[in-house]
């Protein structure tokens, strides 16, 4: 299994409890120049992060025994021993009640947070020992985010909102405009390019957010309750867009408390009090049933 060349095999944890192993070679620094990570010459093995869609057969996502604890009295274990593999091109939903750990999971997958214990690999590369700058580079190059509240910049035009992350991803300036327009066409909003987000409907704003997320051509799209602020018809059109993006090979992970949204994915995971399990279609039907008839089911089991 390949790993980040500058990462030792050690558990991810924050703060690091054990003394650091003695590093015999200085850690090579990564530098972003235009559209790729320029790798230090001491790195023999090419890094998956330098190309948007890796050809390797390794899982795109691999969590091993990931626990995330929040200190307090009492301490909250928002994720408990989560293990998961997601292959490239999969469309996975994660469904669970409020407070079950969904956002914590998405933050870890998106390198916005770190596991307290356990390992997280992207395309076979350990992420635990990456510096904040390296994590930001992986995020910018490989991961698109869509949130429930859209998170658009209110004073910037639709076009500028879509252009912005491409600068972080090092897309050459000359290519940005074309890609932004293409992404906006993709979501059916090229006629709204010069509008401010506040003048758009909720569904349109979410489509702008999706255009922004895919314009950098990420390998992974992470969505946290993407339809939470939308009516049913608008939610369906956003979900149709996700289907299309997945058909084009984008790996999607969609977090939701809505079974209907969850069922659009080809694979559904259930998260319950920080524990992750694979769900079958039957489980999902059953869960709706359970919500209504839980006392009877408990007896029947
Ligand atoms: P969900 O997205 O499924 O509603 P979260 O992942 O946001 O759930 O939260 C899972 C649990 O972790 C909840 O009990 C929540 O209160 C707790 N939690 C989340 N973030 C923090 C934090 N930064 N500090 C303390 N507790 C947190
Ligand atoms: Mg949440």
Image: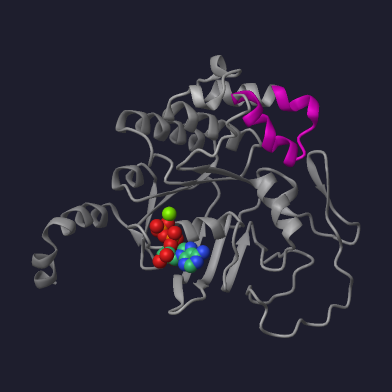
* Quarter of the N terminus within the rendering: bottom right
Residue 280, compared with residue 82, is above or below; it is: above
Residue 60 point in image, percent of width and height: 58, 54
Q: Is residue 99 visible?
A: yes
Q: Is residue 83 visible?
A: no
Residue 293 point in image, percent of width and height: 11, 60
Residue 72, compared with residue 52, is above or below; it is: below
- In the shown orientation, is residue 300 left or right of residue 8? left
Residue 172, compared with residue 18, is above or below; it is: above
Colour style of the rendered protein structure = one colour
- Dividing the image into four equal quarters, which quarter contains ligand 2? bottom left
Residue 230 point in image, percent of width and height: 37, 34
**Does residue 297 show up magenta in the picture?**
no
Residue 175 point in image, percent of width and height: 75, 26
* Quarter of the C terminus within the rendering: bottom left
Q: Which one is nearer the viewer's eye here, 139 or 70?
A: 70
Please report the bounds of the magenta region as a residue range. 158-177
Residue at image coords 62%, 24%: 157
Q: Which one is nearer the viewer's eye here, 231 or 238?
A: 231
Residue 18, compared with residue 251, is above or below; it is: below
Residue at image coords 21%, 52%: 285
């Amino acid at each position: 299994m390949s790993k980040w060349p500058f990462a030792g095999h050690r558990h991810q944890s924050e703060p690091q409890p054990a003394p650091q192993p003695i590093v015999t070679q200085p850690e090579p620094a990564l530098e972003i120049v235009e559209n790729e990570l320029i790798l230090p010459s001491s790195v023999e093995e090419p890094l998956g992060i330098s190309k948007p869609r890796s050809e390797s057969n390794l899982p795109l996502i691999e969590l091993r025994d990931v626990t995330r604890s929040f200190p307090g009295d009492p301490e909250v274990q928002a994720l408990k021993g989560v293990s998961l593999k997601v292959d490239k091109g999969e469309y996975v939903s994660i469904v669970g009640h409020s407070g079950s750990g969904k956002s914590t999971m998405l933050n870890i997958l998106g390198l916005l947070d770190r596991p307290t214990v356990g390992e997280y690999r992207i395309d076979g590369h350990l992420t635990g020992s990456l510096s904040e700058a390296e994590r930001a580079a992986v995020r910018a190059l490989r991961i698109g985010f869509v949130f429930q509240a859209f998170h658009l910049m209110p004073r910037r035009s639709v076009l500028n909102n879509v252009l912005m992350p491409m600068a972080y991803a090092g897309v050459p300036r000359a290519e940005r405009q074309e890609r932004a327009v293409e992404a906006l066409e993709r979501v059916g909003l090229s006629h709204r390019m010069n509008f401010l987000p506040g003048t758009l409907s909720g569904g349109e704003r979410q489509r702008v957010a999706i255009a922004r997320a895919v314009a950098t051509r990420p390998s992974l799209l992470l969505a946290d309750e993407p339809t939470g602020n939308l009516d049913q018809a608008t939610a369906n059109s956003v979900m149709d867009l996700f289907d299309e993006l997945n058909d084009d090979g984008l790996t999607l992970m969609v977090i939701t408390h809505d079974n209907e949204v969850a069922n659009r994915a080809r694979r559904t995971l259930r998260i319950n009090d920080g524990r992750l399990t694979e769900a079958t279609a039957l489980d999902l039907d059953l869960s709706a049933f359970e919500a209504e008839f839980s006392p009877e089911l408990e007896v029947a089991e």
